[in-house]
Image (spheres, grey):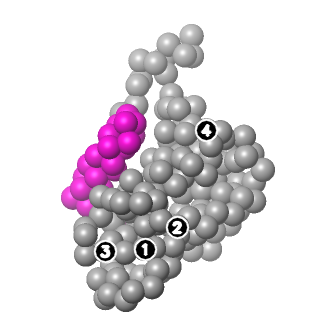
Amino acid sequence: MPTEDIEIELQITCASWCKVPRLRSHIQKAAQAAYEHIPKKLQKPVIVSVLLAGNAKIRQLNKAFRGMDKPTNVLSFPQFAPQELTAAFKGDSPLELGDMVLAYQYVVSEAKSDNKILVNHLSHLIIHGILHLFGYDHLCDQEADRMEKLETRIMKSMGLPDPYFVDEQAKTFKKK
């Protein structure tokens, strides 16, 4: 499918994100890869707003919308509840699917701590967020397993490693 299937409206409020090489390209490729793995009945042109912020902004949003007074890596704000998605996808015009916010410091810290390449970790988080916008969740073990397997399959389709594999040996070696 062409890259126009999912349009990313990108806003950057944390200048540190600009250090990431080919940032827009990585985000677009990950979003498109996620889109290509969702059920065909939910495939029509969509628009997703992505805010690249810092820890302070995501902490504020996490507290306001989830009651958690701490930063996190990514937040997704779907426009539709999962049960509303099929009906929402019946029209012809592009559908505004929802919003995502990522926190630079948190994402970089996670990537370093798990010995991951930053752009790979960013790609995983974009995929994760897009899946949330399409109604996927991980509230119970069964849902989490299903979502993680799909994320791993999407990453593999991009030629990227399993996002849930943490190389503990490399982490130990790195600390010495």
Q: Is residue 110 above or below residue 138?
A: above
Q: Residue at x 67, y 45 (%)?
A: 105
Q: Earlier in the sequence, mark 4 or mark 1?
A: 1
List the residue tagged with mark 4: 109
Horizontal side of 133 relative to 75 (left or right) equals left
Q: Amino acid at mark 1?
A: Pro
Q: Earlier in the sequence, mark 2 or mark 4?
A: 2
Furthest-left residue in view?
Answer: 142
Residue 148 location (% of width, % of height): 31, 50
Q: CA distance from mark 4 to mark 1?
A: 34 Å
List the residue tagged with mark 3: 42
Q: Earlier in the sequence, mark 3 or mark 2?
A: 2
Residue 86 location, quadrant: bottom left
Q: Is residue 92 visible?
A: yes
Q: Residue at x 45, y 73 (%)?
A: 46
For the C terminus, the image quarter is: top right
Residue span colored magenta: 137-164
* Secondary structure character of the magenta stretch overall: helix
Label 4 crowding class (10 Å Cα cut-off): few <14, some 14-19, many 20+?
few
Q: Amino acid at mark 3?
A: Leu
